[in-house]
Image (cartoon, helix red, strand yellow):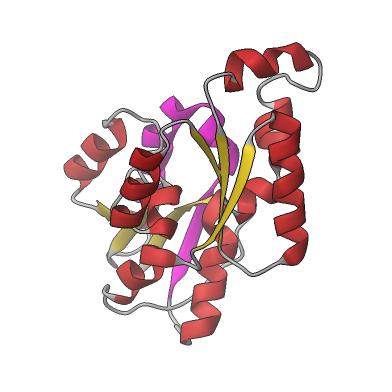
Amino acid sequence: MNIIACGALAHELLALKQLNGWEHFHVTCLPAHYHLTPQRIPEAVRSAIEEIRNKNDDAILVAYGDCGTGGRLDKVLDEAGVERLPGAHCYEFFAGSEQFMHMHEAEIGTFYLTDFLVKYFDTYVTKALGLDKKPELKELYFGNYTRLMYLAQTRSETLRAQAEMHAVTLGLRYEYSYTGYGEMGSALSRTKRISVAEPCQH
């Protein structure tokens, strides 16, 4: 089984491999920073599929949501005959589709963080949005948000403290929900010949 994954899911994929004893499971990670330019994701995934198929004819699963591609990723996958994990984004993978919908409907103005985004907040939020150079932009980006929800994959007190600090930085009410690996693990366990894992880089 070949998995083409977002680099933001690398840690979780490797953890699931260890927890479940999956012994075959070749992972190709694409750079997590593609989320800052989601228009690059579909063609990057297409290239990864073509590269894998030039090497073997094993099944391929894509560990991405739509991730802001506006349906273009699904078009690429339909053309290639490849499936991806269900859901619009990793928040939905981890929280579960039904639970995430409840969260979203309860408070639309919610900014979500995962373990990855808590760890790399400065890179993917502060610097990516230019808040390090122009902190006055915070109101422009987050003025309509009311809550920061940390969807935690691990029970790390260090990450919980960091997430709460990020909420303070953004001026948002902090909430925490432990999700573990959510629907990502169950989706992977339903595939055949699961196992491996090559190291992925963020």
Residue 102 percent location from the top left of the image: 33, 49
Residue 51 percent location from the top left of the image: 40, 50
Quick one: which residue is furthest to the bottom in this view? 21
Given residues 71 and 58, the one toward you in this image is 71
Please report the bounds of the magenta region as a residue range. 25-49
Q: Is residue 132 left or right of residue 193?
A: right
Residue 145 shows in this picture: yes
In terms of image quadrants, where is residue 68? Answer: top left
Residue 97 percent location from the top left of the image: 30, 54
Main SS type for the magenta part? helix
Q: Residue at x 70, y 67 (%)?
A: 156
In terms of image quadrants, where is residue 14? Answer: bottom right
Quadrant including the N terminus: bottom left
Given residues 140 and 102, the one toward you in this image is 102
Q: Residue at x 77, y 17 (%)?
A: 135
Q: Is residue 190 above or below residue 137?
A: below
Q: Residue at x 31, y 79 (%)?
A: 193
In terms of image quadrants, where is residue 157? Answer: bottom right
Residue 202 shows in this picture: no
Query: Is residue 194 inside the magenta stretch?
Result: no
